[in-house]
Image (tube, rainbow, N blue to C red):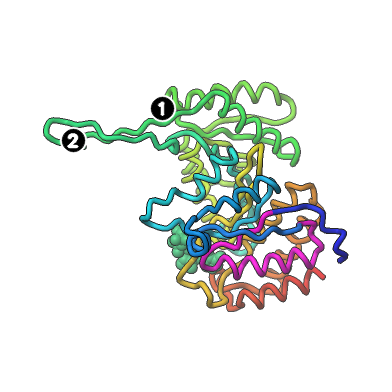
Amino acid sequence: MTKDSKTIPATLIPGDGIGPEIMDSVVEILDTVGAPFVWDKQLAGMAGVDAVNDPLPKQTIESIRRTSLALKGPLTTPVGGGFKSINVTMRQEFGLFANMRPTKTIIPGGRYEDIDFVMFRENLEGYYAAMEHYVPVGDDPKGIALSTGYNSRAECRRIVKFAFDYAVANNRKTVTLVHKANILKLLTGIFLEEGRKVAEEYKGRVEFNDRIVDACAMQLVTNPWQFDVIVTTNLFGDILSDLASGLVGGLGMAPGANIGEKAAVFEAVHGSAPDIAGKGLANPLALLMAAVMMLQHVGRQDLADRINHGIKKTITEGGIRTKDLGGNATTKDLTAALKQQLS
Ligand code: ATP
Ligand code: MG
């Protein structure tokens, strides 16, 4: 590959724990297929605290502002010390309103074959606005705990429209909106109301239906094949997307993206896995699949398809799997096998 083929600046954050190991693996694989990214390596998480006493250094934020694109390893938010959650800060800083999580079966022979749906979670509002306080009752100053969530009409529209546009662009047939409008009549009623209006605009192109969140949780377990694109509010999306990852092999196989108008940040869903850090055992596939989403985001579906195909062949026909998937391959073994498959 020539240097000229690298044309898209992107921020690279190796992260904490297993982050640097899996990031090395992913960058090697991206290089093997000639991915177009020019990396600007930046620190965050504990690595940021150790270097400049800041889990999300200014320089890192400025880099993402410049590139609008980041691949991020797992970050540890230090407990105590008054540090704010890195993920929440990043979402607010760049208005990353859509959290996207594809859920697809890759390993055959599991409990669920042929699952293939995508979940979009509203990332900025709902109960995550975290406006909480206590109300005194009698002598008890903390007798009642109160949390205020909100959903704005504009944001409901924006996330639902985003899901519909995704459906159109990716040949998906149905969008299912998940809510609890029978009980939270206003907070999630407004989401359903705006969703129905948006659905009208896509009539004839994309089907629309809705589910109440409790029923949806049950159906995700009993018949997940009925789902194609799901769009839901912040807290419901948090819970349902983890449930979804459990259907297809767990955390080592779950990529995610946080997308906004000013930037997009791609990541593995799992954490820094301190228990296996530095041992060479980590599964790099969740982060690799996040990089695949990043390739799709910049219009390189060709490279995304190539890597996806390579992953499938390597872990099925090749039988090369890390420990979390029941194999005995190290991170390096899997990386080498993937590189061989892809070159
Ligand atoms: P953090 O505090 O950063 O959230 P954690 O250990 O609480 O870390 P995860 O990192 O999400 O949570 O890990 C949960 C479990 O799954 C751990 O036992 C970990 O070893 C395992 N795990 C997570 N990611 C991977 C991976 N990529 N490969 C192999 N095992 C993993
Ligand atoms: Mg964790």
Residue 42 in picture, x, y percent from top left = 62, 59
**Does residue 25 belong to the magenta stretch?**
yes
> Does 201 sit above or below residue 220?
above
Give 199 or 86, whichever is nearer the viewer: 86
**In the picture provided, is 329 more to the left or to the right than 146?**
right
> Does 202 sit above or below residue 274?
above
Q: State which region is magenta.
A: 11-37
Task: Give the residue furthest to the front.
Answer: 52
Residue 223 in picture, x, y percent from top left = 55, 46
* First in residue order: circle 2 vs circle 1: 2
Residue underneath mark 1: 184
Residue underneath mark 2: 141
Give 229 or 36, whichever is nearer the viewer: 36
Cα distance, mark 2 to mark 1? Answer: 27 Å
- For ligand 2, the image quadrant comes to bottom left
- Given the image, on which type of amino acid does mark 2 rest? Pro
Residue drawn at the location 59% of the way across and 30% of the way down:
209
Query: Which callout, 2 or 1, points to the residue nearer the camera?
Result: 2
> Does 148 sit above or below residue 31?
above
- In the rendered structure, find residue 5 and report the number of the disc placed on it: none
Residue 117 in picture, x, y percent from top left = 63, 46
